[in-house]
Every structure is written in C-alpha cells, then in structure tokens.
Image (cartoon, rainbow, N blue to C red):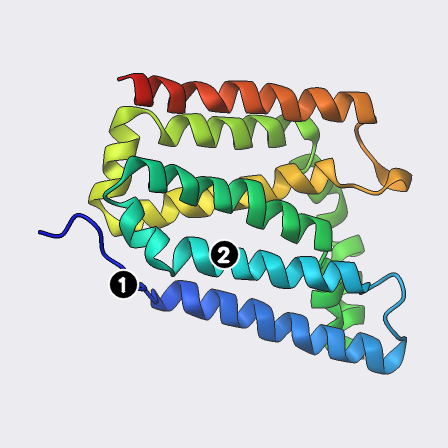
C-alpha cells in the first residue's frame, strides 16, 4: 500500500457545489456591473478575495492534500487550517451575499427582500449570528472532531468525513464574518473581537497539541 498518493479526488458533490457558487457569483457580478457598476457592492479586492477563497477550497478538498491528509496527520491538520483559517476568512472578507442576491432577476431580488423582512429571517439570522453561539459552534466543532473517537469516525467513513469538513467550513465562515464586520454594523468592539479570536485560538490548539503528544 502506498503511503502517499498524488491523486486528485474530484468528489462530485464538492465539484458541483464549487461550480454552482462560482457560476452564481459570476452571474451576480455581471448584473451588478451592467446595471450599477462595481462600486461598494463588488469591489476589486472583494472579487479577488472570493476567487482566492474558492481556489483554496479546491486545494483543500480536491487536490492531493485531501488524499494525503487521510494518511498523514500533519497534512490532515494543514487541510483543516486551509478550510478554517484561509478559505473561510477570504470568503467572509469578500462578503458575497449581495452579489449572490443580484444573480436573481429584479422580481426575484424583490421576492428575496420581502421574504427576508416579512418572514422574520432578519431576526432569526441575527440570533444565529450572535457572537456567543458562533464562538461556541466554531470552537466546539474543532474540539469535538479532534477527540480520538470522532477523529477515527471521520477517517473511516466518507460521509462522516464530509460532515466534518462542512461543519469546519460553515462555522468558520460564521466566525470570520463577525470578525470582519464593517465598522458601521459591528456587534463586537475591536477589543472584544481580539478576545473573540484569541480565546478561540487557545482552546482550538489544545486538542491538536494533545494528539501530537499522544
């Protein structure tokens, strides 16, 4: 049995998800630039951050990093760091939500706006994105999946492995969205944001350190 393989995985659900995100974003970007210009909705740095974030996801989930990570613990941890500490911050920084909404035609955008305000989605989202539950979800997800038994589950079963990666990425995206909120709508002061990030870094580092020592 080979210890290291250089195969690309091309998991259908990963390829399809990334392709849908890219096409959806490009349609929205095209409509924005055709109707209102780029401006504050789709700045060059935001578009570049989105493209870089997608590129990092490709490296983490489809390149040999994924297959090698199943055999080498060090590469496995690099894969997790790419998902949580590189791809997620880049995509959060790019703030693609408005671009995705612009991918809909005018009537669709109005429908999304009515649903957002009329169905209570705005309040629900503010509750979900409160800093405390986001911190608990992000930190708890990392700690949970690096306990020995869940870690073994993820290596033994492809679906559990996919759930692990999805939980890492989604909670990281929520976490970094709060960190990068604009000054006009921040829920945390800059000092509180420093505590928010540093406490997560300390607690998230403990399981990896214990696994390495073990």
Looking at the image, residue 170 sits to the left or right of residue 185; the answer is left
Distance CA(mark 2)–CA(mark 1): 16 Å
Q: Position of residue 150 (x, y in %)?
A: 29, 31
Residue at the disc numbered 1: 7
Crowdedness of circle 1 by 10 Å Cα count: few (<14), some, many (20+)? few
The answer to whether residue 105 of the structure is visible from this angle is: no
Q: From the viewer's perspective, is residue 32 above or below residue 60?
A: below
Crowdedness of circle 2 by 10 Å Cα count: few (<14), some, many (20+)? many
| Residue occupying the point 72% across, 37% down | 178
Looking at the image, residue 54 sits to the left or right of residue 28; the answer is left
In front of the other: 141 or 57: 57
In front of the other: 41 or 120: 41
| Residue occupying the point 23% across, 56% down | 5
Dot 2 or dot 1: first in sequence order is 1
Q: How many marks?
A: 2
Q: Position of residue 123 (x, y in %)?
A: 75, 42
| Label disc, if present, on residue 38 of the rendered structure | none
The answer to whether residue 180 of the structure is visible from this angle is: yes
SS category of the residue bearing label 2? helix
Q: From the viewer's perspective, is residue 132 above or below residue 38?
A: above
Q: Position of residue 1 (x, y in %)?
A: 8, 51
SS category of the residue bearing label 1? loop
Discs 2/1, front: 1
Residue at the disc numbered 2: 57
């Amino acid at each position: 049995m080979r210890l290291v393989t250089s195969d690309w995985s091309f998991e259908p659900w990963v390829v399809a998800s990334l392709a849908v995100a890219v096409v959806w974003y490009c349609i929205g970007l095209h409509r924005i630039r055709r109707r209102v210009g780029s401006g504050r909705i789709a700045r060059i740095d935001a578009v570049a951050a989105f493209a870089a974030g997608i590129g990092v996801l490709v490296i983490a989930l489809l390149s040999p990093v994924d297959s090698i990570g199943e055999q080498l613990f060090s590469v496995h941890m690099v894969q997790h760091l790419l998902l949580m500490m590189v791809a997620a911050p880049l995509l959060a920084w790019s703030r693609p939500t408005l671009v995705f909404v612009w991918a809909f035609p005018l009537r669709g955008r109005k429908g999304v706006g009515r649903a957002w305000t009329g169905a209570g989605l705005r309040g629900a989202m503010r509750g979900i994105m409160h800093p405390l539950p986001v911190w608990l979800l992000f930190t708890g997800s990392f700690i949970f999946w690096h306990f020995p038994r869940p870690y073994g589950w993820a290596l033994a079963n492809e679906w559990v492995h996919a759930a692990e990666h999805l939980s890492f990425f989604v909670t990281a995206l929520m976490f970094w969205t709060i960190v990068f909120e604009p000054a006009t709508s921040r829920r945390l002061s800059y000092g509180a944001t420093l505590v928010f990030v540093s406490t997560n870094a300390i607690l998230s580092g403990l399981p990896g350190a214990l696994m390495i020592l073990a």
